[in-house]
Image: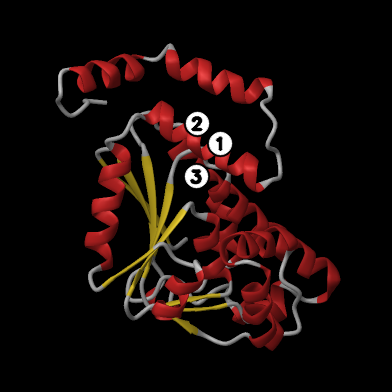
């Protein structure tokens, strides 16, 4: 298995570590994601997850496995379930997630990046979703994440054309949040910033934004419980006290 999970203080890093294959994701790697993300979810000290590659973020699913593991409709469905399960484990983590993208971020690599809350790219990053070159229909959940990020017109162009986009185009259309010469430094700054904020606020914001994305805009009991949790939290007390004392809060 070629995924590595490390923790440094409040930040966990999941590294796709298969450089000989440009970090292409095998069926085994997709299948391992839910358990790895479960470790992050149940680690109280971890406040942010960064997903990264090395020279390349990920060239996508390992097409070399397709003739063996995706043979026939049943094999394709089983493989697709593993990909969906891995991406959904990232999207539903409940903690902020940042994709640190260098080099190729293609196909399944884009699925992983789009499942993250925030995407930060290097100037040399390249993005693409190539099912139209393979006779595959991109899954509905992953297509929705693409549409949510870039809008329907750009989603159609990306999916219809299956071409690579450079980092500046990805930034312009909203596929990524930031572009840096030194992507690791940019991600380190952003992850430290988020980890230093009131986590009751961060968790609440993530939940509410995801509800809005899903078309749920009413004030439900679930949402009101988030408000209640916040105003009764020690972080709220510290935030107000720090404001009144004109000092940075210590969360």
Q: Which residue is mark 2?
A: 204
Viewport quadrant of the C terminus: top left
Q: Give the mark, 3 or 2, whose residue is nearer the N terminus.
A: 3
Q: Which residue is mark 3?
A: 37
Q: Around disc 1, counting alpha carbons within 10 Å, would you say few (fewer than 14), some (14 to 19), or many (20 or more)?
A: some
Instruction: Determine whether, in the image, residue 36 is placed left or right of residue 138.
Output: left
Return the residue found at the far top. Answer: 232
Q: In the image, is residue 97 above or below residue 246? A: below
Where residue 177 is drawn, which disc sits there? none
Q: Nearer the viewer, mark 3 or mark 1?
A: 1
Q: Which residue is mark 1?
A: 207
Q: In the image, is residue 141 above or below residue 220? A: below
Q: Around disc 3, counting alpha carbons within 10 Å, would you say few (fewer than 14), some (14 to 19), or many (20 or more)?
A: some
Instruction: Determine whether, in the image, residue 238 is placed left or right of residue 236.
Output: left
Quarter location, residue 76: bottom right
Q: In the image, is residue 87 above or below residue 234? A: below
């Amino acid at each position: 298995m070629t995924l590595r999970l490390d923790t440094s203080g409040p930040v966990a890093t999941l590294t796709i570590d298969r450089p000989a294959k440009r970090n292409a994701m095998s069926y085994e790697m997709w299948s391992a994601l839910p358990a790895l993300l479960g470790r992050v979810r149940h680690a109280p000290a971890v406040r942010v997850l960064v997903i990264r590659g090395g020279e390349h973020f990920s060239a996508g699913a390992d097409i070399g496995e397709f003739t063996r593991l995706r043979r026939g409709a049943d094999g394709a469905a089983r493989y697709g379930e593993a990909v969906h399960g891995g991406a959904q484990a990232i999207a539903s983590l409940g903690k902020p997630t940042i994709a640190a993208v260098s080099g190729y971020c293609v196909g399944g690599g884009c699925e992983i990046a789009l499942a993250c809350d925030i995407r930060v790219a290097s100037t040399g990053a390249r993005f693409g979703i190539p099912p139209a070159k393979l006779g595959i229909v991109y899954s509905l959940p992953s297509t929705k994440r693409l549409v949510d990020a870039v809008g329907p017109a750009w989603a159609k162009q990306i999916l219809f054309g299956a071409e690579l986009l450079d980092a500046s185009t990805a930034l312009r259309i909203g596929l990524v949040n930031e572009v840096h010469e030194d992507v690791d430094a940019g991600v380190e700054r952003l992850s430290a910033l988020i980890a230093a904020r009131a986590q009751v606020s961060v968790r609440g914001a993530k939940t509410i934004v995801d509800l809005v994305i899903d078309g749920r805009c009413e004030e439900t009991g679930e949402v009101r419980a988030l408000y209640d949790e916040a105003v009764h939290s020690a972080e709220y007390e510290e935030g107000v006290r720090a404001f009144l004392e004109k000092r940075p809060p210590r969360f």
